[in-house]
Image: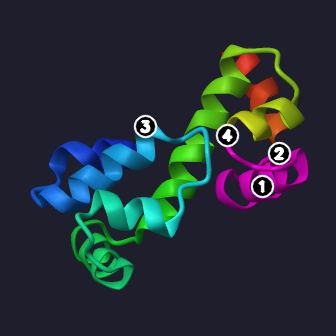
Amino acid sequence: MVRRSSNILAVNDPVVAAAMRYIHEHDHEAVGVKELEAVAGGMSLRNLHRRFVSLLGYGPGEAAICARIERAKHLLAATALSVEEIARRCGWSNGRTLSSLFQQRIGQTPRQFRAQEATR
């Protein structure tokens, strides 16, 4: 499976590429609408969303969540940090939010993911 972050390299739209770069550089925090509008040179979020969907098949909000989950996966595999601490380092207020998103997107809890990675 190709990581969504790999799509940064394949995007021919400089505005979308800049927004993707910003999202990945800020995967430790929740990226807001105002930040993305500024990175997009003042383009409306609606137009930025349309360009994302046109080029990548998903919007900037989804890209931000995926970047933060990728960061969480890395931290789970490479550190002994608690799920609560990893959630904070990925811009979520608590471990429950991370666990819920992780379960929905990855199909397992963060602890299950960590245990699986430990056996590799």
Q: Say what secondary structure mark 2 lies in.
A: loop
Which residue is nearer to you in this view: 7 or 112? 7
- Percent position of residue 7, x then y: 28, 49
Q: Name the residue under label 1.
A: 103
Magenta stretch? Answer: 91-108
- Percent position of residue 2, x then y: 37, 44
Q: Say what secondary structure mark 1 lies in.
A: helix
Mark 2 and mark 3 lie on one chain; the one further toward the N terminus is: 3
Q: Are marks 3 and 1 in contact (CB under 8 Å)?
A: no
Q: Mark 3 points at which residue?
A: 25
- Percent position of residue 51, x then y: 24, 75
Distance between the alpha carbons at the discs numbered 4 and 1 = 16 Å
- Percent position of residue 73, x then y: 64, 34
Q: In the figure, residue 44 lies in which quadrant? A: bottom left
- Write the residue at 45% across / 58% down: 63
Q: Do the residues labelled 4 and 3 touch (CB within 8 Å)?
A: no
